[in-house]
Amino acid sequence: MLYSPPKFAENEPAVLRAFIDQHPFAVMITRSGADAADTDMQISHVPVIWPTGDRQVLRTHIAAANPQGRRAEQAQATVIFSGPHGYISPNWYSSAPAVPTWNYSAVHVQGPVSVVQDADERRATLRELVDRFEPAGEGAWAFDGLPEKFRDAQMNGITVLEISIESLTGKFKLSQNRPADDRKGVVRNLEQSNRPDDRTLAAFMRSRPGIVS
């Protein structure tokens, strides 16, 4: 379970779905086994999509040789999506004394896993994944443009997984526990950083209601 004090908790489903769409490369942890002593934990780093429509599921794929796929049916998954994050110096605060901290954003999804066996569903998952991330425009690579025999051979090398969303929780730790002047100082210094990740964090903080006015 994700530890998230009320000040940092984000529970709005539309916000969490948008976060997943914006930060789709996730850590997928699966556990199988009848009891704790026999629990088998597997971990992969995977691109994940929340398919269009109203179904409360995630889809991803891994190499067929990955043992996580062979042990996935009816396993329990935790899928972790990470967003902007960075070091926060107490020198950026107006109030003192203070200590350093780390601001970050994350969404956790938990639920049972199933292996997608239907050939049309498998192709639809890969087609949507490509459509989400392939740059648009003339000459864009198309999944359906592959020769059928080659495409089918490549698909034999993957396992497509579906995770039913039973739990969806977010934590956006963005200095909400600090006074307004401290939050402004954090954003201002992040924006002046030479690290792109810091500037991305600053933009995310500005985008969230109530962080800075």
Image (cartoon, helix red, strand yellow):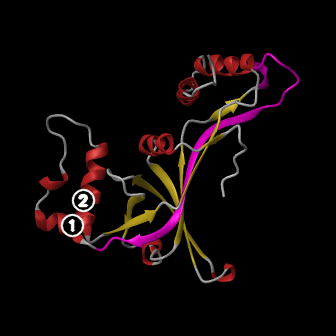
Question: 24 or 169, which is in the foreground?
Answer: 169
- Looking at this rendering, what residue extends furthest in the right direction? 97
Please check the rendered image and state whether residue 187 is part of the magenta-colored stretch, yes or no: no
Span colored in magenta: 90-117
Residue 168 percent coordinates (x, y): 54, 53
Residue at 56% x, 23% y is 206
What's the amino acid at mark 2? Ala
Residue 43 percent coordinates (x, y): 54, 64
State whether residue 47 is above or below residue 136.
Answer: below
| Residue named by callout 1 | 120
Spatial CA distance of label 1 from label 2 is 6 Å
State whether residue 109 is above or below residue 155.
Answer: above
Q: Are marks 1 and 2 in contact (CB under 8 Å)?
A: yes
| Residue named by callout 2 | 124
Residue at 52% x, 62% y is 166
Q: Determine which of the numbered discs, if any, sits on residue 205 in the image.
A: none
Instruction: Indicate the secondary structure of the residue bearing disc 1.
Output: helix
Residue at 70% x, 30% y is 176
What's the amino acid at mark 1? Asp
Question: 116 or 56, which is in the foreground?
Answer: 56
State whether residue 127 is above or below residue 205.
Answer: below
Instruction: Indicate the secondary structure of the residue bearing disc 2.
Output: helix
